[in-house]
Amino acid sequence: MSENGQREDPLIKPNGVDSDDDDTVCLGESFFINDNYELTTFTFGSHVLQLLCLQSASTDFDLTGQLVWPGARLLNEYLSNNAEILQGCSAIELGSGVGITGILCSKFCRAVMLTDHNDEVLKILKKNIELHESSENPNPCAALTAEKLEWGNSDQLNQILQKHSEGFDLVLGADICFQQNSVPLLFNTVQQLLCLRGKKQCRFILAYVSRSKMMDVMVTNEAIQHGLKIHEVDGTRCVIANLEGVIYEIIL
Ligand SMILES: C[S@@+](CC[C@H](N)C(=O)[O-])C[C@H]1O[C@@H](n2cnc3c(N)ncnc32)[C@H](O)[C@@H]1O
């Protein structure tokens, strides 16, 4: 309460209350975060998934992971039509967002780790894992875990690898190439994950959605500069949400 008995908004400090920071308006982080997630149904072939997500982006900073992107739809269609790729595998997903790809994979894989760098996104990702696990009872699928992983962050990657020293059979990514400065870091992380398996091959399956010519070139160049081989999977180039999408397979 203020001196005159009026209730103060906890987020906004009125002008003149503190003499030394007179014009400061303090808005807590939560003021900008929309977490009015809606339970939404997605169908991929015969697989139906229900997840909490937003229907559109709400801010101009990186909360892109609060909704399902066209690349995830493309990757999930591809994986549900080619589920043999996943059968019995261990997989790690990079930039999982709300988790729609990793959660689909848990129907076929033996273990799936979903990762993201954004704490707010990790919260909804973990909620969706719980939601999925409770709906799959009494026949739960693969072990699903969520971990914080910022591309290029070796400490975080090493912590994950301490628990998974044998590495993963598959690395997955949907719509994660959209910011130029993070693409080299992404490929740095991918290279480290692929190198772990040495000759026993592990592959990175990337659903790429083209939004700029510069990024199209950058993805291929970064893969090559990190000593990786990149090829387009036949028959996967398509139009998705009015954009061109494609599945790439990337190996050491
Ligand atoms: C465009 S969204 C795609 C989300 C999801 N894969 C999909 O297709 O619906 C990009 C995701 O990558 C994550 N991301 C962006 N930059 C990252 C970084 N440097 N390290 C780790 N995750 C990152 C974001 O938090 C977000 O969840």
Image (tube, helix red, strand yellow):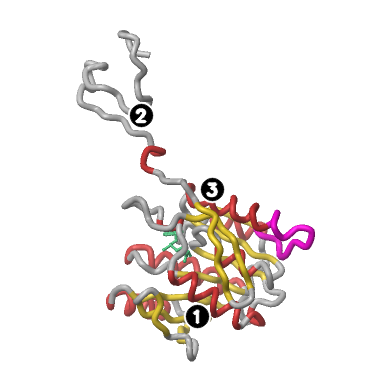
Residue 250 is marked as: 1
Tell me where the magenta segment starts and ends, as one range: 133-144
Relative horizontal placement of residue 67, taking residue 41 as reference (left or right): left
**Which residue position is annotated with label 2?**
11
- Between disc 1 and disc 3, the foreground one is 3
Relative horizontal placement of residue 170, taking residue 228 as reference (left or right): right
Relative horizontal placement of residue 54, taking residue 163 as reference (left or right): left
- Between disc 2 and disc 1, the foreground one is 2
Which amino acid type is marked by label 1? Ile
230 above or below 165?
Answer: below
2 or 3: tag closer to the N-terminus? 2
Classify mark 3 as within 8 Å of ligand 1 or not, answering yes or no.
no
Task: Please name whichever residue, 250 or 100, is drawn nearer the observer in this view of the structure.
Answer: 100
Relative horizontal placement of residue 134, taking residue 31 as reference (left or right): right
Which amino acid type is marked by label 3? Lys
- Asked if marks 2 and 3 touch (Cβ < 8 Å), the reply is no
Q: Could you tell me how far apart the alpha carbons at marks 1 and 3 are, in whole angstroms?
A: 30 Å
Residue 123 is marked as: 3
Res 208 seen here: yes
- Residue furthest to the right in view is 138
Task: Please name whichever residue, 46 or 18, is drawn nearer the observer in this view of the structure.
Answer: 46
Q: Residue at x 66, y 64 (%)?
A: 165
2 or 1: tag closer to the N-terminus? 2
- Asked if marks 2 and 1 touch (Cβ < 8 Å), the reply is no
Name the secondary structure under disc 1. strand
